[in-house]
C-alpha cells in the first residue's frame, strides 16, 4: 500500500467518524431542546398547581372555609 492510499484511507476514516460525531451532536441538541420544552411545561404546571385560578369554580362551604384561613 502506498503512502497516498494510506493517507486517503485515513482521510476517509476521519470523515466517516466526523459525520458520525456530527450526527450524534445533532441528536443531543434535539434531545436537549425537547427536554427544555418539557421542563418549561413542567414549570408552568407547577405554577398553576401552586397558584390555581379557580375563580367561579371555587365555591361551596369548603372553599369559603379555606379562603377564610
Image (cartoon, rainbow, N blue to C red):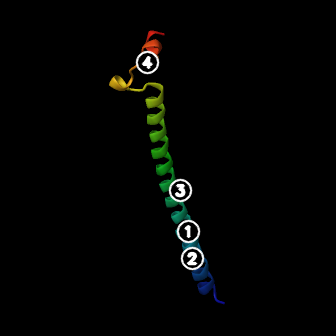
Q: Local crowd at mark 4 within 10 Å, few (<14), some, or many (≥20)? A: few
- Give the percent coordinates (x, y) of residue 21: 56, 64
Q: Local crowd at mark 3 within 10 Å, few (<14), some, or many (≥20)? A: few
Residue that carries the numbered disc 3 in the rendered image: 28
Q: Local crowd at mark 1 within 10 Å, few (<14), some, or many (≥20)? A: few
- Give the percent coordinates (x, y) of residue 34: 47, 51
Of discs 3 and 1, which sits in the foreground?
A: 3
Q: Is 57 left or right of 40, judged from the image as shown?
A: left
Residue at position x 43%, y 30% from top?
48
Of discs 4 and 3, which sits in the foreground?
A: 4
Residue at position x 59%, y 85% from top?
4
Do the residues bearing badges 4 and 2 touch, measured as CB atoms within 8 Å? no
Report the Cα–Cα distance between label 4 and label 2: 72 Å
In the rendered image, the residue lying farthest to the bottom is 1
The mark that comes first in sequence, 1 or 4, is 1
Question: Residue 11 has which mark?
Answer: 2
Residue at position x 48%, y 56% from top?
30
Of discs 1 and 2, which sits in the foreground?
A: 1
The mark that comes first in sequence, 4 or 2, is 2
Of discs 4 and 2, which sits in the foreground?
A: 4
What element does badge 4 sit on? Answer: helix
Report the Cα–Cα distance between label 3 and label 2: 26 Å
Relative vertical location of residue 62 with respect to residue 8 in this rendering, above or below: above
Report the Cα–Cα distance between label 1 and label 4: 59 Å
Residue at position x 38%, y 26% from top?
54
- Give the percent coordinates (x, y) of residue 42: 48, 39
Q: Quadrant of residue 37?
A: top left
In the rendered image, the residue lying farthest to the left is 56
Residue that carries the numbered disc 4 in the rendered image: 63
Of discs 3 and 2, which sits in the foreground?
A: 3
Question: Residue 33 has which mark?
Answer: none
Amino acid at each position: 500500500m502506498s503512502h497516498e492510499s494510506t493517507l486517503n484511507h485515513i482521510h476517509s476514516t476521519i470523515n466517516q467518524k466526523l459525520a458520525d460525531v456530527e450526527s450524534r451532536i445533532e441528536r443531543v441538541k434535539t434531545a436537549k431542546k425537547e427536554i427544555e420544552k418539557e421542563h418549561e411545561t413542567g414549570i408552568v404546571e407547577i405554577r398553576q398547581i401552586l397558584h390555581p385560578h379557580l375563580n367561579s369554580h371555587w365555591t361551596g362551604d369548603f372553599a369559603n372555609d379555606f379562603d377564610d384561613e
